[in-house]
Amino acid sequence: MRAREIPSLALDSYQRAARVALANHLVTATYPDRIALPLLRRWATELREDLLELFGYRLEVTETTARLFPVLDALDSTQPARTASDRVFDRRRYAYLALSLAALGRAGNQITLSELADHVAAEAGQVDGVELATDRAADRDAFVDAVGWLAARGAISLADGDAGGWANNPASGEALYDIERSVVVAMFRPPRAVQHLRSVTGLLVGSDEQTEDSDEDGQSRPPIDPKETLKKVRRALVEHPVVYFDDFDQDGRTALTAVRTVADVELLTGLIAERRAEGVTLIDTSGRMSDLRFPSTGTIAQVALLLAGEISDRVIDPDALELARHPIPENGDLIDLIDSAIPGGGVFDDLAEFGGRGRTGESSTTELYPFVENSWVNGAVSDLVERYGRTFAAQWQADPIGLGERAVGMLHRLRLVHIMSGGILVLPVIARYRDVVISVRDRIPQDFLFDSTEFDGTEPSSHSHTTETEAH
């Protein structure tokens, strides 16, 4: 591992580079910022070796881009593409994004937003269920969101005009973009040609191995390489907020228990491991690798923290009715949903080679977790609003149901709960936030009498309320 050879004075720089690569699989001259690419280029050789050795990830670095090619052990619905306003992409926006990227790959050095929209509309018309009608405001907004996602990552850069003006009125608004060819080429590089896939599982690691169908023919699966098990565990540590022992089979649990497994990831990233009886989490004190800080400021994050404490107390309440317990549902529904969008017939059936429901890395045991119904969650959030609502943002004070949904969604992304039909499953690490200390400070303005010779130009603060929460 090359990180062990780096002098201590330079180790912090190397760890920052590793965090940038792992947090942003595509780095350009402007994304995520202007210092990221020079930092990665400085440590490109060492990072290539360490990322490949520890995780099986491949890193390509050029003068204009750095592209990390990860491998997936399972589907993850908690990391969707998001708009500039943090709205999750829907199927329409994903379709526009893919078609825009294809159109940019065939375009010249510049393209107007209306030209790009015409190309996407023409291609969308050939796909059942996809359409871009520029006379519909909803379609234009979704298309601009997809274009904005590309622009934020440097695939295109605004040369003139305004995309918002076009979205409001395409007859009078326009935008001109420069196309960054190297970024477009680096952006879409799937491990296999998508037209060769029978299922989205064909993109997962090990999908080219023998599947369950081969077992029915009496053939056994090939043994798992212990080195691949270690890589799988390390990948989980950097891809998920919490890694539970229950996520793995016995070999994986043994690897996660080993001190060396976690220590190597700590050395590479500079993160600090917190070991608990149920699993391991890496604490990002830098704030540069995590896409979601918790605990944090803001109404949703504060309510999520308070709700975590309420849920923990409900699970261990000896006077309440015992909660039912259920396993975490497998991701078969998500696979079916994605596979349903794969065009059938014609060239796709002729070319399809990979896919199926073979080994995808799930635990071999079935663990049961307490189930809390949505009605209880809604009641708990309403109670929190009643107690602390004056400290919350105004938009949420009148919408406790929406606030609860956003707070639960945050806990789900953090793997503290798992959302399912009718309620949530409570995962073990949520107990970390059981003893939440709540401090409400009310700042009340005071009347001041000023002497003209002593007035320093400041004014008394306005009346405000803040909630400070801290987890122990």
Image: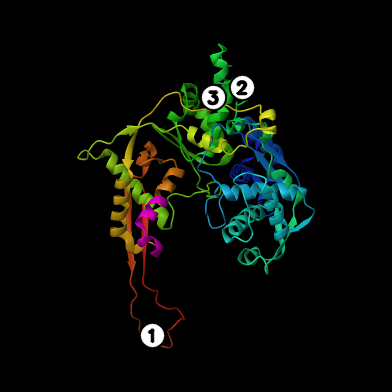
Q: Position of residue 311 (x, y in %)?
A: 32, 44
Label 3, label 2: how many angstroms apart (C-alpha)?
Answer: 9 Å
Q: Mark 1 points at which residue?
A: 450
Q: Residue at image x 33%, y 61%? A: 389
Q: Name the residue under label 2.
A: 209
Label 3, label 1: how many angstroms apart (C-alpha)?
Answer: 75 Å
Q: Earlier in the sequence, mark 3 or mark 1?
A: 3
- Camera-side residue of 101 and 301: 101
Q: What residue type is labelled 2?
A: Glu
Circle 1 SS class: loop
Q: Where is residue 324 in the image (x, y as percent from the top left)?
A: 29, 34
- Camera-side residue of 59 and 382: 382
Q: Where is residue 155 in the image (x, y as percent from the top left)?
A: 70, 52
Q: Which amino acid does label 1 sit on?
A: Phe
Q: Residue at image x 42%, y 24%? A: 365
Q: What stretch is highlighted in magenta?
A: 393-406
Query: Do the numbered discs 3 and 2 sit on residues whose CB atoms are within 8 Å?
Result: yes
Report the label total: 3
Magenta highlight on residue 403: yes
Q: In which quarter of the image is residue 2?
A: top right
Q: Mark 3 points at which residue?
A: 359
Query: Do the numbered discs 1 and 2 sit on residues whose CB atoms are within 8 Å?
Result: no
